[in-house]
Image (tube, rainbow, N blue to C red):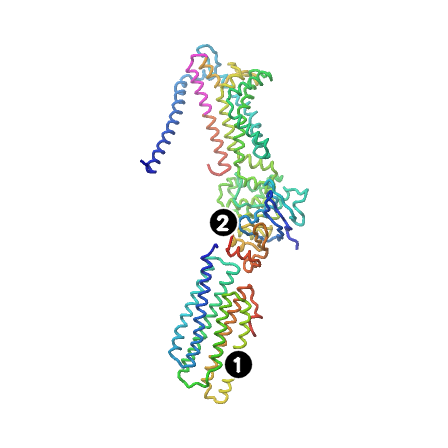
Amino acid sequence: MDPKIRTTNVDFFYGSVQALKQVTLDIREHHITALIGPSGCGKSTYLRSLNRMNETIAGTRLVGEVLLDGEDIYSDGVDVVELRKRVGMVFQQPNPFPKTIYENVIFGPRVLGETNKERLDYLAERSLKAAGLWEEVKDQLSKSGLALSGGQQQRLCIARALSVEPEVILMDEPCSALDPLSTLKIEELMQELKKEYTIVIVTHNMQQAARASEWTGFFLMGELIEYGETSELFSRPQEKKTEDYITGRFG
Amino acid sequence: MRLSSRITGRIAFGLIWASGGVAVLALLFIIGYVVVRGLPEINLEFLFTLPRGGLGGEGGISSCIVSTLWIIVVTMVLLTPLGLGAAVYLSEYAPDTRLVGFIRYGVELLAGVPSIVFGLFGYAVFVTVLSFRFSILSGALTLVCLLMPYLTRTAEEAMRSVPREQREAALALGATKWQMVARVVIPAAMPGILTGIILCIGRTVSESAPLFVTMGGSSQMPDGLMSSGRTLAVHVFYLAMETNALEKALATGTVLVVLILLTNLFTNWISERLQVRMMGVS
Amino acid sequence: MPRESYYQHLRDLQDEVLVLGSMVEKAIARSVTALRERDLDLAHRIVAEDSKIDARSEEIEERCVQLIVTQQPVAGDLRLIISIVRIVDNLERIGDHAEGIAKIAIMIGDEPSLKPLIDIPRMAEKARDMLRRSLDAFIKRDDQAAIAICEEDDIVDGLYDQVYHELLMFMLEDPKTITRATRLIWVAHNLERCADRVTNICERTVYTVTGKVDPSKTSNY
């Protein structure tokens, strides 16, 4: 069974600084993969290279292969807009646009060219339901997105990402700005979402990685130290560095 | 003797209150003086008749009101796309080169040039060389040159203060760069941009020197872009310098103040409606 | 190092296990002494002090629960704490076996002894030695030593067979000795169970180090 995303020997540079070293990793479809590691270890850089978001920063360069369904997303002729439709992203700080909830959710389909109102309404409802937010906002779609609580805003961002019907959802520490209850709600949501999507989550919170994911990769100073099934990695890690990190002996 | 920090705090607080009070009082005094002395002169006849000139400052200010409106419209129609376009370029598309830094510096410099210098420039270029003569067009073009640095700077800052996360969110959803700018950055910056536009309108209304040398001083009702005209601000100058109708000058001033007050109130209202729509709070 | 107080807790906990181990070891020794020397006072004391062993082991277990709740241990730390819980349980049972021997000594009272006790003290000595070394191996995380100790359980089993057959002979020759003989068989049985429990402790050492339990190395049926 081929992996949904396969990265092979990826090196990544911010100018002359090397942030990723020979990272080779498979992301399995319909699974939740967690990336853990201390600050600055490269896990966010790795995540952002999966939808070419690193290119919004000047002076960055990637060497190696990043295959989505077997095709290299960095080869010439790849449409970045199309890629980002297939590989969506949710960020650390909830960042809804200063627009209404409805406009937030259908922003993606709109910029991709959808104009049919019925289709947009359908996508809005479906995405909000999938994000577990529909019941709370269905009567207030014209309210500003910024009027929601932090946890709701993040779920709105998830709905927004879902509305373009992606295949992969990348989450960069999606819960670190949220209270514990909202965090648990989003973890529950992830378990539902993985049935239809593939999820990759970067997290600082090791209990979250242990709770919510099936596969975990441990990054340290730009290298992938260990990658394995979450239950194995957390009960019987193979590398000493992994054990030292997850037991809190450093980091 | 060392004062305790509580006492110094109290003294500082008192001084700050006093300065604020002085500023407010001065403002009230000035406006009050103008309005109190000018208000009696204002009646329907004043507002709707043409100025007739003469030492006594006969007549009203009808043509001045119309000229002012003309100049506002023409200036803003020309200024807004230019200023916004420059702001979008500088904020979103300009590369980080020396040339661009130079352009930015130039814009800053222009903002400091005295308005009469722009007036002379306008006279030389628009009135004379381009043969637009004394006209609303010359006046408007001159004001565009004067105000562009302000609008560009204000709009650019408004756009730059849109957080990076908003832009990233748009790009991550599959927007192109232009879609991100047009659909996320500019709408989010709209309150700031609107403030800039209204500020420019306010300055248009209050400028006298540059318009004095580019619009001519005709007291006739303007009938086109190329008509000469006299705005309210310029008319105040005329009345004050060439007649002894001080009351009429003050009355014109009152109308100006009212106009600016209305403009500001309108700005606040629009800004607030926008805030509510965008942020859900006022 | 971050979490220094947590590691101190872990070290303290392991020290507590050693203390409990030595209490239990002494109980075995003294129970056999009480039997051999018909020292009923000693026997009663051993029975009374078993409650201290029980209390201590519960305390250690409770501290393990606290550590799990407050520190969310993972990997080697988690295996260590789980192992301590199970080792302490085994130690407490060994303590119960020693108490059992003391109770038998009380039952025998000052009856004349059937035969000089030779193999039983040997069993006790072997079991004590295995216990001491198994706890040492645990603290040192020496899984190889732990596996070796498991194999010595055969010696204790052999001694038990010897005792059993010898006492069987007594019972067959003279039915009047049955009561006394069966009591001695029970003592030997208790000691044999002590040694079995020690192999459980060794299993825990292997688990802590490797994360796996390999019954073929540690059990012996």
Mark 1 and mark 2: Cα distance apart in space: 64 Å
Q: Nearer the viewer, residue A103 or C22?
A: C22
Q: State the residue position of label 1.
A: C161
Magenta: main secondary structure equals helix
Q: State the residue position of label 2.
A: A182
Residue C116 position, x and y percent, is: 46, 84
Q: Which residues fall within the magenta stretch? A: B242-260
Seen in the picture, residue A28 relative to C126 is either above or below; the reply is above
Q: Nearer the viewer, mark 1 or mark 2?
A: 1
Check disc 2 and report its element: helix, strand or loop. Answer: helix
Q: Residue at x 46, y 87 (%)?
A: C177
Could you tell me the amino acid type at mark 2?
Ser
Q: Chain of mark 1?
A: C
Q: Nearer the viewer, residue A181 or A178?
A: A178
Seen in the picture, residue B233 relative to B197 is either above or below; the reply is above
Seen in the picture, residue B184 relative to A183 is either above or below; the reply is above
Residue C34 position, x and y percent, is: 41, 79
The answer to whether residue B196 is seen in the rendering is yes
Residue B125 position, x and y percent, is: 58, 18
Is B32 left, or right, of C197 in this rendering? left
Q: Residue furthest bottom?
A: C173
Residue B82 position, x and y percent, is: 57, 27
Could you tell me the amino acid type at mark 1?
Asp
Q: Chain of mark 2?
A: A
Q: Is C168 within the magenta?
A: no
Check disc 1 and report its element: helix, strand or loop. Answer: helix
Mark 2 and mark 1 in contact (Cβ < 8 Å)? no
